[in-house]
Image (tube, rainbow, N blue to C red):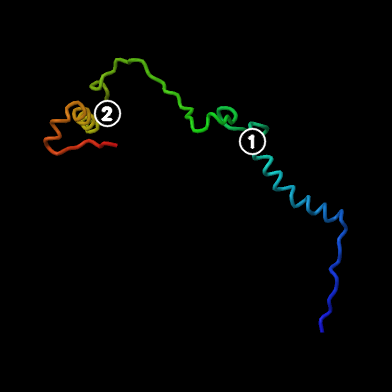
Amino acid sequence: PFSVQQAPTTPLLQQLFGTLLNLAFPLFLLASFVASRQGGPGGGMPGGGMNPMNIGKSKAVLEMEPSTGVKFADVAGCEGSKLELAEVVEFLTNPGKYEKLGALADRK
């Protein structure tokens, strides 16, 4: 009732060529990713290459402005915002006054 036949065999060279074609695209993607991470052709990481000792370190630079002579009262803008900021400064300089009213500073 059933006829069993042997599967047709493909030549070894054809099998090898097919396997290489199946591996070529993923290997190309992996190689291009590694090359881009190492600063090779096609880009690289900003700020230089990858140094394992610099992982997690910020590249931010603190730039302090010199004293400009501009006072808080000289700045034009929303008066409500200026009043709220003045309240925050007052609370930080004199917290006892506000603690009597029940205000508490965040302790984070």
Q: Nearer the viewer, residue 83 or 20?
A: 20
Q: Secondary structure at mark 1?
A: helix
Find disc 2 in the rendering and name its residue.
77
- The circle drawn on residue 72 is none
| Residue 78 coordinates in the image, percent (x, y) | 25, 31
Residue position marked by numbered label 1 in the rendering: 36
Residue 21 located left or right of residue 12: left
Q: Nearer the viewer, residue 92 or 4?
A: 4
* Residue 29, position as x, y percentages in the image: 68, 44
Toward the bottom, the furthest residue is 1
Disc 2 versus disc 1: distance between alpha carbons? Answer: 47 Å
- Report the side of 100 relative to 83 (left or right): left
Q: Secondary structure at mark 2?
A: loop
Residue name at image x 17 percent, y 30 percent: 95
| Image quadrant in which you'd find residue 8 | bottom right
Mark nearer the N terminus (2 vs 1): 1
Task: Name the image quarter holding the N terminus.
Answer: bottom right
On screen, residue 63 above or below 26: above
